[in-house]
Amino acid sequence: MYLSKIRLVNWRSYADQTFEFPKPTAKKPLVLVGAMNGHGKTSLLLALYIGMYGRFGVRYCEGLNHAAESDTLFYRKYLKMFRRNDSDQDQPTSVELCFSPTIHDETSEEIRLVRTWYFTSSGSPKLGDSFEELRIYSNEKPLRIPDVDLGTDRLSRLLFPAHVMPAFFFDGEQAQTLITSAGTPGIKKAIEVMFGTKVLEEVHQEVRNFINLSHSRVGGKRTTTKLEDDLDTKTTERERLNKQIAQLQQKEIELGKLCDQIDHERKAIEEKISLLGGKDGQGLSALQERLKNTQKRLNDAERSIKDSVRSLGVNLALSRFHVALRNRLEAEDQRETWEQLRKGTLERADQVLDAAIPEPPERDELLGNLSGEVRTKVRGRFRNALDQIYNPPPQGCASEYLHGHVTGEQRKGLLENLHRHLNQNEDQLRKKVQELRSATNDYEDAKARVDSFANLPQALEEMANELKRLNNDKSEAYRRLHQAESEVKKLKADLHALSAEIGQLTEQLAKFRPEQKRIAVAERVNRVLDGLLTELKPFAIKHLEKAVTRHYSEIIDQRFKDYTISIPDEGSPELRDKSGKVHLVETMSGFERRSFGIAFSLALAELTQRRLPLVIDTPLGNADSDYRPRLLKALTNVDLDQIIMLTHDEEVNGKLLSAVDHTVSAKFLIKFDDASKQSKVHANSYFGNNS
Amino acid sequence: MNKPPCFQEPESKKVIKKLCEENKIDDELLKDLCDVVISFSGSGRKEGIPADITDCIDRFIERA
């Protein structure tokens, strides 16, 4: 927000003057108000404090008495001083201030306030409360306020709290007094208010009141609390019972498993006994009979297998030569086929020769004229040629007969029989081996049983003891299982009864349910606020220290550039150098203290995160030529919408003015007119020009 | 209505968020309650505060 209007009527040296400030822009936030000493600068600053907050403003106004308990008394005294001496006695004194929203707070309302003071003919404020009147307008709509104090309180909500003012409206020459006059408790209080913790404290109080009121509405805190306590106790008891039942049920399962295991072990022992021949009444004689039978079976099997093995020798021998014999027989079979073909051909050779060389020669028209000797030679050659067809014999054909006694179909039958016989013997032998194995097993089993009778008394005694132990274990396990089951049953009955009681309590509480819910939420809010008020205060101090250090380092000379500032719980703020050495701000030079005060004010302004107008009276004062540009730069760099500087002619002029002129949105010059004895405001004027 | 600065400052917002989560409320409820206190400040009608707090809490219960 920015200050858009200040109207002062019968205020100090002002008869009726108005400042109207244009809406600032980001590039032109600066307003210069020039006045020589005693012409009305400080009156303007005072008007802001007293106009805004009346008697509460006195507390924060530099140079005035700060004793809070005597606000009212001093307020009247100061008002008499603030009234213009030459005022018409019927005319009241008033301060009108208007705060308008900027681009940063467009949703806010324009707040205009007019604080008016009425005086007696002697120039003193009127008696009682009627001497003061406050009117507040929100967007020109008047707000209803019961009395001035409550109206002032309302203003602190609509605009900013009174504690904030020293951070935004201050006299540069007196800035350092903030260190000592406010004191650490005052600074902390300011932080509480600026950071919102004051509002949170009030919320805390109201929420506590609300909780008490709500408890009384639902029949008193004691009644509902007792019901809730009972419900809590019983709910806890129910949870405990549920856990106990779950544990017992787990125990039941484990005991059930134990019983099963014992049964399993008993069965195993019974089986052992049965294997000893006891359980089924199988006697020793029956076992011996069985042994005898199995022994006979074993002997038969052994004998049979010996025979088989014996014949297996022939079979094995046969099988060994089986392939060679088969190949031999096949080769001989092939030879037999070849010989038959050759023989057949040769047998038909005469017929062929007769056809080729017919006899007698007279029938042979072609070769009949050959001599008998030649014809005989030709026939011999022809016969030899026929014989060459079958020589040599085909490959694989036997060269001679080793098994010449076996021929033709007989040979083929022999091969088939040989093959079948071998296979049959293998199957029979395999079966006999199986039979031998089975007979051996049966025999050994029967023999073991018969042998076991030799140790039967001792084994039986051991098993009987084991069975006895298992029976005892089983009884114990079943006893515990039944005990657990009955405990579960009893607990479930208790749980049922408890659930019924919880139901009744819940129904009773349900009557108060909405209010109870609200109380529960309010209690939670209460806890949050407890925590917040504890955690935010030191947090705010830490931020303030950082911000002061930063602003101070911008203003101060190189010697203090790396210093950090801390605000101790008690005592004055401290500067700490790199080595950790502490320097008290109080012991520094005047302008260093003043710079600290300005840095502190700017830090407070920053910490509030409020965009209030910054109004500084004589910001540079008597600063030297090194400090002045640094301080002016630090002030104009503050991220706020409007910066109003109240300066005398030696502060912002010449080169300094040229350096900041482009950021100036408006200039005013206040001149005290000796003739009319009043300060007059000249808009668009400043020292040395009338721009 | 202007909220207290601690609702805007990033680090204090974290503190508020953490405490609200721990106690199962939202910061909206806190802001509403601040609004109530601020709006009644200076009005001279403080007897209306419990009713407005009830409204705030009921709105919270509804949205929770």
Image (cartoon, rainbow, N blue to C red):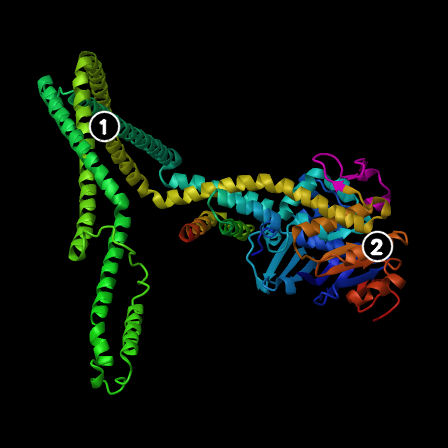
Q: Secondary structure at mark 2?
A: helix
Decide whether residue A123 is among the magenta residues.
no
Q: Residue at x 69, y 52 (%)?
A: A606
Q: Position of residue A215 (x, y in %)?
A: 40, 39
Q: Residue at x 46, y 40 (%)?
A: A523
Same-chain status of marks 2 and 1: yes
In the image, which is nearer the foreground, mark 2 or mark 1? 1
Q: Secondary structure at mark 1?
A: helix
In the picture, the disc for residue A260 is: 1
Between disc 2 and disc 1, whose residue precedes? 1
In the picture, the disc for residue A90 is: none
Q: Residue furthest bottom?
A: A365
Label 1 amino acid? Asp
Pick the residue in front: A168 or A46.
A168
Q: Position of residue A472 (x, y in %)?
A: 21, 17
In the picture, the disc for residue A630 is: 2
Q: Residue at x 80, y 67 (%)?
A: A662
From what the image shows, is residue A406 above or below residue A278?
below
Q: Please say if the residues under marks 2 and 1 sit with CB atoms less than 8 Å apart.
A: no
Pick the residue in front: A333 or A632.
A333
Q: Position of residue B18 (x, y in %)?
A: 53, 44
From what the image shows, is residue A342 above or below residue A491?
below
- Visible residue check, residue A51: yes
Badge 1 sits on which subunit?
A
Query: Range of the magenta residues?
Result: A565-593
Between the residue at mark 2 and the residue at mark 1, the CA separation in whole angstroms equals 94 Å
Label 2 amino acid? Arg
Badge 2 sits on which subunit?
A
Pick the residue in front: A604 or A44.
A604
- Visible residue check, residue A61: no
